[in-house]
Amino acid sequence: MTIAPADFEYVQKLVHERAAIVLEPGKEYLAESRLLAVARREGLGSLAELVARLRGERWNPLHRKVVEAMTTNETSFFRDAHPFDALRRRILPEVLERRAAERVLRIWSAASSSGQEAYSIAMLLREEAAALRGWQVGILGTDLSAEMVARARAGRFSQLEVNRGLPATFLARYFRRRGMEWEIDEAVRGMVEFREMNLADAWPVLPEMDVVFMRNVLIYFDLDTKRAVLARVRRVLRPGGYLFLGGAETTINLDDGFERVVLDQAPAYRPRAS
């Protein structure tokens, strides 16, 4: 089943207006594969019927399902490893020294999908419980998709998901088998707050962050949106805070307010001192 050019153009415009995601020509196959599942769940016989319904109605939950279906939710525990090594070996000791008076540590996993990144951070910090005793630790996970946020809050993962990047020792220590799934320990789940948030919309009031993980997100945005998002991140980061981006992403030529640093093979970005 193929999507008509005019229908693909409609989906491109919808996804860009609502999520600032650039769906480039040549991605018709992606729209077809993802939206066919939405059409079937809605009892519709074709992509043409789905788009016709979207065109004929104001913004409603069906439009949101389509936008969410076109977002990419690829994630895994401790994905790419280096940023987590840098957090534990370099950033955490630095924050423990710099914030010793107030004893507050806040980390944000933006575009957190089904929660593996945020829970990886939480498990890592649990491993440093002795050093963080008496500290207020807050981990925020946000995502555009209501479905992904609900999955993240539930803290349940398939065998395939726990096989991807999760050390066996952490599986034994922090997970319990629940039928065909693995459920993360309640204490770890309680360390993370998950919220719905569209990075391309106006942001809610956020606390100042010591570290922001915003990896493999900017690549889907147009130039103006990338710049706007980075400017907002810079305002959220505490002085001396760190931003981690994906391997194909950078602030260079987008926001001169950041400087690039390398921490144990992990590129990161810090707001420049004013």
Image: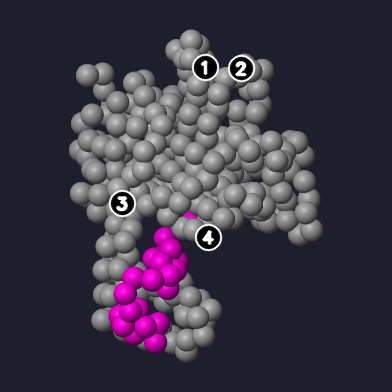
Residue that numbered label 1 is attached to = 103
In the rendered structure, does residue 57 fall within the stretch colored magenta?
yes
Image coordinates of residue 66 in percent, x first then y, are 41, 70
Check contact, mark 2 vs mark 4: CB within 8 A: no
Q: Which residues are magenta?
A: 49-74
User: Badge 4: how crowded within 10 Å, few (<14), some, or many (20+)?
Assistant: some
- Secondary structure of the residue carrying tag 2 is loop
The residue lying toward the viewer, choosing from 184 and 187, is: 187
Image coordinates of residue 48 in percent, x first then y, are 37, 86
Q: Earlier in the sequence, mark 3 or mark 4?
A: 4
Label 2 is placed on what type of residue?
Gly
Up/down of 205 relative to 51, above or below: above
- Quadrant position of the C terminus in the picture: top left
Horizontal side of 237 relative to 25 (left or right) equals right
Residue drawn at x 36%, y 43% is 204
- Secondary structure of the residue carrying tag 3 is loop
Label 3 is placed on what type of residue?
Asp
Report the disc number at residue 201: 3
Up/down of 79 relative to 259, above or below: below
